[in-house]
Amino acid sequence: MNTTPIKSASSINFFLLQVVRYEDITPHMRRVTLNGNNTTNQELFTPGMHIKVFIPQAHQEQPVFPRMEKGRPVMPEPDEAPAVRTYTIRHYDATTGELSIDFVLHGDEGPASAWASRVEAGKYLGIAARTVKVFADTDWYLLAGDQTALPAISAILESLPASARGFAFVEIPDASEEQPLTYAAQIPLKWLHRNGAAAGTSDLLRQAVEAISIPSENRYIWIAAESTKTKEIRDYLKQEHYLQNNELYAIAYWKLGMNEDAYHNARHQES
Ligand SMILES: Cc1cc2nc3c(=O)[nH]c(=O)nc-3n(C[C@H](O)[C@H](O)[C@H](O)COP(=O)(O)OP(=O)(O)OC[C@H]3O[C@@H](n4cnc5c(N)ncnc54)[C@H](O)[C@@H]3O)c2cc1C
């Protein structure tokens, strides 16, 4: 495949990939499989880790990557700048170099969802990856998230040993969005159906989390969903279960009514 070589910086690694194929796992979840010429045996890629995707503008075939200055990415001018969004590596095959990303198709308002809904073999997508550890090793796990977190929750479940126990909850629109998953861990996955409620508006995840018994030690809780819903669950867990920071990962994956750029800017201003 004719793709440009990896542009490497001290902490961020950019890859230019091309779509190999895609399939609809469920009506609103599209798996896009990509490859590039630097992706075989790539230690940076682990299923479950998050990456930045760089989506070319409509007039471009390929995205223009940021340039690195003093270790920091500097975006191209607005007429060239790609849309940058955050996604999860769902599968990675080190031998072939293929990696898959599962996109929730939530409409054309967002550039990532719009790109995925019109994807074709041969289309270009940029990604940037850096090594991050996504979860801790312990005995008992609670994994809870909405459909955007399903790729990460699936990858975590598949990576845990048969001795791991706990609960997993995934909020989805309805039964048609359930996916068959195979894993060894003794962690039953319960699908929570919104049944008509809009994404980011339901309390199903919080109610499910509040209904279970959580051990007081050797535990790890991983939460990812819409921003307000994630904060509500995080606050409940901290107040009622006295979780330390190393026992809890609670990350807003998106914010209702805001695109990812606006949401990130708002968070920077807050902090
Ligand atoms: C670490 C991390 C990993 C993630 N991994 C994945 C992944 O593997 N797969 C995945 O699909 N998403 C994933 N997400 C979520 C994804 O980044 C956001 O949904 C993102 O906003 C999508 O970009 P967009 O261009 O489609 O929409 P944007 O331009 O960001 O937003 C446009 C509008 O759509 C709304 N919106 C955004 N996402 C959704 C949604 N899911 N449902 C309904 N409305 C929405 C926004 O509120 C906004 O009003 C991840 C997020 C993070 C932080």
Image (tube, rainbow, N blue to C red):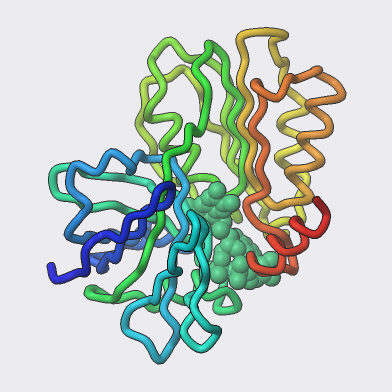
The one of 67 and 179 positioned closer to us in this rendering = 67
Residue 245 shows up from this direction: yes
| Quadrant position of residue 179 | top left
Residue sticking out furthest to the right: 239
Q: Residue at x 63, y 26 (%)?
A: 221
Q: Whole-percent x and y of residue 85?
A: 53, 63
With respect to residue 42, does 63 lie above or below?
below
Judged left or right of residue 99, residue 166 is: right
Q: Residue at x 52, y 75 (%)?
A: 111
With respect to residue 120, does 201 lie above or below?
above
| Quadrant position of residue 30 | bottom left
- Numbered marks: total: 0
If the picture is divided into quarters, which one holds ligand 1? Answer: bottom right
Q: Whole-percent x and y of residue 79?
A: 51, 89
| Quadrant position of residue 34 | bottom left
Residue sticking out furthest to the front: 70
